[in-house]
Amino acid sequence: MIVKIISYGLAVTVGFILAYLIFAGPSEKQPAMVEQTKIIDSKPLKKTGNQENLLEQIAANSQDKAAEIDQLRTLVKNQATRINELELELKDKIAEIDAKPENPSKLETITMDDFEDRIKGSLKNRFRGVAIELKEDQVAEFNKMFNNSSTKSEWGVEFENQIASFITNGDPNGLHFVEEVNCINQMCRLKVQSNESQSWQELYSSMTKENWFNSMTLVEKSEIPGMHIYYIPKPQDM
């Protein structure tokens, strides 16, 4: 009898414990799980290794694109400069073609005015940026002409002003001193003192390419340091 009571008590006790573990256990642990879930959700997201690699690749691609754009801009600028040079060369070639007779096998008779017009067309651009050095006897003749004559013409005054204005505007730092610009009869003489030879040569060369210049340049070799002496024939269209 006592054994049965003890067995019954043990069975009840075991049943009570199992019921407690089944029903009471989960209800007490559930709030902790919810709280843990909230804590996990509130943490900031971290960048993975793939995301960092992607961002670095995007930044590198952006830098490459910027470099390519700069290269394209430089290429376009260089090509524009080359196009301008080719246009000038094309004009020279057209002038040379226009100066040739259409039928070389047939003798063509032209007037002196036609001859002068053809000479102007063919030589107009050939001597831009070119200085022809004079011989000593030629320099002596030119100096004699300027020493014995002071007569100025209307074209001479206009041409003197154009030369002086161009040099002044092209030399904002005052590196080149114009000692003389004098046009008489059919010739002009220009004397410039400059210790910046390269800068002066570039400035004068650019002046010969102006439409109003339309002449050639004869140069006297000077033994005076920094002295540049030029003789410029009367422009063809003056």
Image (cartoon, rainbow, N blue to C red):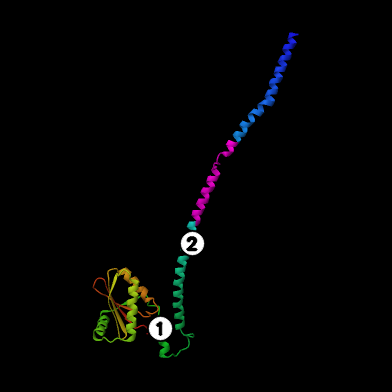
Q: Residue at x 24, y 86 (%)?
A: 148
**Identity, as a three-letter code, of the amino acid under mark 1:** Lys
* Numbered mark located on residue 95 in the image: none
Number of numbered markers = 2
* Residue 200 seen in this snapshot: yes
Q: Which residue is mark 1?
A: 120
Q: What's drawn in magenta, residue-wise?
A: 38-65
Q: Quadrant of the C terminus?
A: bottom left
Image vertical order of residue 43 relative to residue 219, above or below? above
**Observer able to see residue 131:** no
Q: Quadrant of the N terminus?
A: top right
Please report the residue visible at 70 percent of the width from the left and 18 percent of the height from the top.
14
The image shows residue 231, relative to residue 58, as above or below, that is below
Q: Dot 2 corresponds to which residue? A: 72
Does 96 sit left or right of 5 as displayed?
left
Percent across and percent down for residue 118 are 42, 85
- Camera-side mark, 2 or 1: 2
Q: Main secondary structure of the magenta part?
A: helix
User: Which is more N-terminal, label 1 or label 2?
Assistant: 2
State left or right for residue 213 relative to residue 194.
right
In the image, residue 54 lies in the stretch drawn in magenta: yes
Nearer-the-camera pick, 140 or 212: 212
Seen from the viewer's position, the closer of residues 171 and 238 is 171
Q: Amino acid at mark 2?
A: Leu
